[in-house]
Image: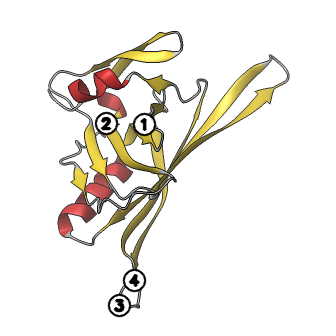
Amino acid sequence: MCLPLTQGYNFANNCATNAGSGEVLFIEKSNFTSFALTANVVTTITRASTKVFRSYLVDEGTVKAYSNFNLNPTNDTYKYEHKLDITLKGWTTAVANEVKLLGLNRVVAIVKGNNGIYRIYAPNVGLKMVTGTDENEEALDGFIGHKLSFTATETVQAYEVDSSIIAALLTP
């Protein structure tokens, strides 16, 4: 059952680092129709009518996206295991509800790397949230929020996405 994501998320404190990412775009897999490549770069993404990617803006370094790939020697093909770890600060009802919706859906994610390049993860099968924790540390300056991990096994790599199409993905 597909439950629509209801909101984006913005809790970026402009803590610039050289690690990780500060932006992730999510859409429900059921609302992601297709994509097209030009020279192994995604140049077109088609979504269901009126559906949009939701932007999650977080502190840089709180998103880790990567793909492990393994050769199948029987047929000389690769399988890619896409993984995405994201930290959402805050413990409000709205954030908790969005975390629940992310967990109930398979999602396609586009991650903006610290180098400014966008990459798409699991466009064919969608990522599934496999673990999540709600944390409320005891120190006065301790972390309060959610740590989420997504994974998917794909037949395609995490393709680069042409940055010129990103703005259009956020509007119906």
Using the image as rendered, state which of residue 27 and residue 142 is in the foreground: 142
Could you tell me the amino acid type at mark 1? Gly
Classify residue 133 as left or right of residue 94: right
Using the image as rendered, state which of residue 144 and residue 133 is in the foreground: 144
Mark nearest the camera among 2 and 3 is 3
Residue with the mark numbered 3: 140
What residue sits 38% from the left and 52% below the top?
Answer: 103
Residue with the mark numbered 2: 27
Mark nearest the camera among 3 and 1 is 1
- Residue 165, x across and y down, in percent: 30, 22
> What is the distance, in whole Å, between disc 4 and disc 3 at their CAs?
6 Å
Indicate whether 7 appears above or below 141: above
> Which type of secondary structure does the marked residue at label 4 adopt?
loop
Counting residues from the N terminus, which is met first, the one under dot 4 or under dot 2? 2
**Label 3, residues with CA under 10 Å away: few <14, some 14-19, many ≥20:** few
Could you tell me the amino acid type at mark 3? Leu
Counting residues from the N terminus, which is met first, the one under dot 2 or under dot 3? 2
Could you tell me the amino acid type at mark 2? Ile
Could you tell me the amino acid type at mark 4? Gly
Classify residue 40 as left or right of residue 102: right
Q: Are marks 4 and 2 in contact (CB under 8 Å)?
A: no
> Which type of secondary structure does the marked residue at label 2 adopt?
strand
Using the image as rendered, state which of residue 132 and residue 138 is in the foreground: 138
Q: Which mark is residue 142?
A: 4
Mark nearest the camera among 4 and 2 is 4
> Which type of secondary structure does the marked residue at label 3 adopt?
loop
Mark nearest the camera among 1 and 2 is 1
**Label 1, residues with CA under 10 Å away: few <14, some 14-19, many ≥20:** few
In what quadrant of the picture does the N terminus appear? top left
What residue sits 45% from the left and 27% below the top?
Answer: 123
